[in-house]
Amino acid sequence: MKKIMILAIALLMAGCVTLNQGGRSVSFQESWALLPFINNTETPYAGERAEAVTAALLYARGVQQLKRGTAEPAKPEEISLDRGEQRQRAAMELAKQKKVKYVLMGTVNEWRYKVGLDGEPVVGFTLQVVELPEGRVIWSGAAGKSGWSRDAVSSVAQQVLERLLSEFTEKK
């Protein structure tokens, strides 16, 4: 056990993190793309906010080559129409063209403060890691959380996204 811990620390310090998911190796040294999140909430730009937090967490976990989004930002009139699905599809095609190995795609299902005296923050997400060019989903997770009235939605979102990413990166 001690040797495994030393090896894991050495790999992390070297910046080479390889994960084994279902018999396949997934490397943070490969190219990754973070696709635009689909926003299933009534909160404008919740998807973009979740993407920003997720990108920071991926960099902190060792992803070195992370491509983000599409060539064009979301237009206000598109946000309510398709919730970001067109941008996500376009980003997936762009990732395939650029020969990205893995994409992380997500959906924001909740991003708000509960109605009431305390106004507790509530968030909910689904994430998927897809291996390209096959388009095979190699990991999927969903999580949500309600925080305390003194918490910010973004803080609770960071906690939930961190938990989801840790489930993915720590599974062997």
Image: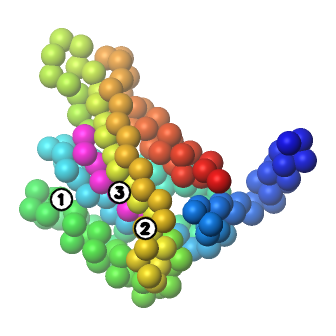
**Label 3 is placed on what type of residue?**
Gly
- The foreground one among 75 and 122 is 122
Residue at image position (37%, 46%) is 142
Magenta span contains residue 48: no
- Circle 3 sits on which residue? 106
**What residue sits 43% from the left and 38% below the top?**
160
Q: In the figure, residue 118 lies in which quadrant?
A: top left
In the figure, 147 relative to 34: above or below? above
Between marks 2 and 1 in the image, the one whose residue lies nearer the viewer: 2
Q: Is residue 119 visible?
A: yes
Q: Earlier in the sequence, mark 2 or mark 3?
A: 3
What segment carries the magenta color? 103-110
Say above or below: 162 vs 145.
below
Helix, strand or loop for disc 1: loop
Placement of 114 over or under 85, stated as above or below: above
Amino acid at pointer 2: Val
* Image x and y of residue 76, in percent: 14, 59
Q: CA distance from mark 2 to mark 1?
A: 22 Å
Q: Quadrant of the N terminus?
A: top right
Asked if the residue under mark 3 is in contact with the one under mark 2, i.e. CB atoms within 8 Å, the reply is: no
The residue identified by callout 1 is: 83
Residue 9, position as x, y percentages in the image? 82, 48
Q: Main secondary structure of the magenta part?
A: strand
C-alpha separation, residue under disc 2 versus residue under disc 3: 12 Å
Image spot of residue 90 (x, y percent): 29, 77
Q: Which residue is mark 2?
A: 137
Q: Under tag 3, what secondary structure? A: strand
Q: Can residue 60 be seen by looking at this rendering? A: no
Secondary structure state at the residue bearing disc 2: strand
Q: Earlier in the sequence, mark 1 or mark 3?
A: 1
